[in-house]
Image (tube, grey):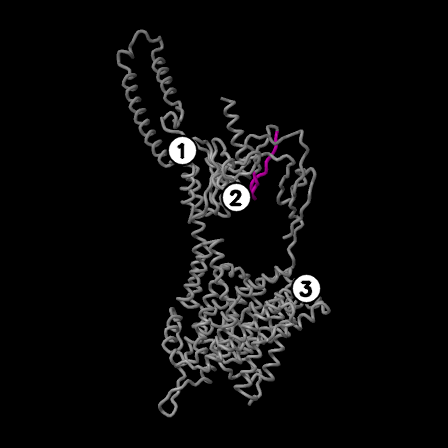
Amino acid sequence: MCLDLARHSAPQPQEAEDLGVHIPMPKYPCPHTVLLLEGHQAPVEGADGPTDPIASHGVPSTLTDVPEPPALVLNFSSCSLPARCSGSAAKSLLFRFLPFLRWLPRYPVKDWLLGDIVSGFSVGIMHLPQGLAYALLAGLPPVTGLYSSFYPVFLYFFFGTSRHNSVGPFAVISVMIGSLTDSLVPSENFLESVNGSNATVNEELRDAARVELVATITVLTGIFQVALGLLQFGFVVTYLSDPLVRGYTTAASVHVLVSQLKNVFGVSQGEHSGPLSLFVTIIDLCQKLPDTNVGTLVTSIIAMVAILIVKEFNHKFANKLPMPIPIELITVSRAATTSCGDAARNPWLKPPVPPNVSYFGQVVGNAFAIAVVGYAICISLGKIFALKHGYKVDSNQELIALGLCNFLGGFFQCFAISCSMSRSLVQESTGGNSQVAGVIASLVILVTILKIGELFRDLPKAILAAIIIVNLKGMFKQFSDLSTLWKSNQVDLLVWVVTFIATLLLNLDIGLAASVAFGLLTVIFRTQLPHYSILGRISNTDVYRDVAEYEMRRGEGGSIPGIPGVKIFRSSSTVYFANVELYAEALKKKSGIDVDRLIEKKKKALKKLKKQQKKLEKEKAKKKKPSSNDARSPSLPQNAEDGPGLAVIELSVGESSVPPEPTLHSLGLPQPNFYAIILDFSSVSFVDTVSIKILKNIFRDFREIEVDVFIASCPVSVLAQLERGNFFSSAITKHSFFPSVHDAVVHISRERHQASVST
């Protein structure tokens, strides 16, 4: 549908017949302008003035001395829907799902290519040791980490929209996969007896089974991500707040650290999974510390110290070094040549293998969790770099790109990937400008797999564990969030702490679900317990602020007066079934009177008055009951039949006249010190049937105590919901709605002034 906007200096009725909406824009608007919803008749001016049933509040709109205002006309007469299938639509769809077709033809070779090449080599060198190490985290042969660093990185070039994200193996995702491999394919299932006495694990069979399982998980993860992206469900990551993600990744880092301690100390441990498995692993490790392999421990410590020193050197002299010193690659290469010597077999890239769908039912929940967490980390980093460098990242396309990388990579024995912060920062700092850097990095991995991949088949686990633990440094720095959140937002601090503890206690999968549930509960609690306030007007302005808060911030002498006779009430949250009862209670409390008790007293007084009236009527009836002698009195007129008839008529007229309705004053009850309440609806985004019902009760209750209720700053969408919910009636009309608080105050003051003048 297209939308034509045109301005007319003097719109005529015959010109507006074909228009969908005609919104006048007066030069001197009246203080109470009401938006007309679809289906309502616009005001019609006649000889007697406006006849608009919605609202004019007695303010004449036929001003002959004011020039006719311009109008904003929304023209729908020329709207035409695009053809369902067209060349331009197909081209746009193709460019959307293959973003490289849009930016690659305009790639500035002279300006960007050199930086992308240097960045690609730097990131590729980082991919090698990290891929090998994170494969160990996933419980897989190290060479599968190289596959996961090649296929997904190469595919992201075609489908991704972030120029600086370095996709590939990531520690948190790897440890989530590792917890599954340990529980579904434990080493105990592959024990074989040697010489009829000792039992050893057949690692070749175990690794083959785990690779099959992990490839299936990766394919299913990709299916979830692609499906969510196609359904435009990229917003699902919004339920993972930043404190939740950071608390979760910090707890996952603790899981990673504990899982690698056995490789550092050189002891063998059984695999544990499920809730409290982290603490079971720690206890088991402490019991086996006397069996520590001193050589393995020394090797791990030396490797960690060397890597830490060189990383700090790279960070300190980042501006002077053309590229970071690849200390991790040097360490791994040295260990590979020492342990394996020359390659005994020629490595190759394995052909694609379909997933084992029989695993789908067992891993569907874990695959969805991996899909959401991996995407959350990827899109958060992508948006940071996009904001810094001034380009846009399509969240739904990123979800599709990540899903395709996982889906297709699963056929080539890859495990699920995400985005690494350390590699992304290196890609940006070394001059990376586009996804071309990722292609260069994937080519570095490809050459490694084809030429020297066999060297990495049997790496010392102590070296890989050292690399993993050193790379957790950035994750553990997130503990500094605790002090920051304590000062800024303690609810977010609670989310961080609960997420961290839940993930430690319940493991990664159940911990994530519990953390998301708790995060959503905090949102519900915050909407149930909003800030309620009474507003006052800042002198000589039309600005209204919280009286108590303004006085507290400005100190003595900075108070703002309330509006005499008017209470302006505002809630910081929307009004719906979960908090509308609290809204009504807070309104009555802030008004300064016990509304329910006053209504109860009024009902009792009316009941008592009614009894007194009935008693008086009975007494009058006894006194005025005519006797038989009076009927025959000679003083009656000649037409005796008319006399009694006239008397009866006079009496019936007197009895049928409606007496004035009792007021609080006439009943001897205390009167409120205000006569109007304005409900500021500026923060209300929606209403439901329960809130509509309670709002009706609010109007009814305050009307009982002779207080008028008005609503200001109500969004058009909320007004439409109120209308669909049958909120309006003869007792509650749209005369009670105003576009702003100030308009409502002006109207109430004018009406009060006119009433006082007329009396």
Q: Is residue 38 magenta?
A: yes
Q: Is residue 65 magenta?
A: no
Q: Secondary structure at mark 1?
A: helix
Question: Gap in Å between the C-alphas at discs 3 and 2?
Answer: 45 Å
Residue 246: x and y, percent? 49, 62
How many residues crowd mark 3 within 10 Å: few (<14), some (14–19), many (20+)? few
Question: Gap in Å between the C-alphas at discs 1 and 2?
Answer: 26 Å
Instruction: Look at 60% across and 69% down and name the residue there.
Output: 426
Q: Specify the segment rendered in magenta.
A: 34-46
How many residues crowd mark 1 within 10 Å: few (<14), some (14–19), many (20+)? some
Question: Which residue is situated farthest in the bottom direction here?
Answer: 195
Q: Amino acid type of disc 2? A: Ser
Q: Secondary structure at mark 2?
A: loop
Residue 351: x and y, percent? 56, 82
Q: Amino acid type of disc 3? A: Gly
Q: Which badge, 3 or 1, comes first in the chain's sequence?
A: 3
Tag 2 residue: 682
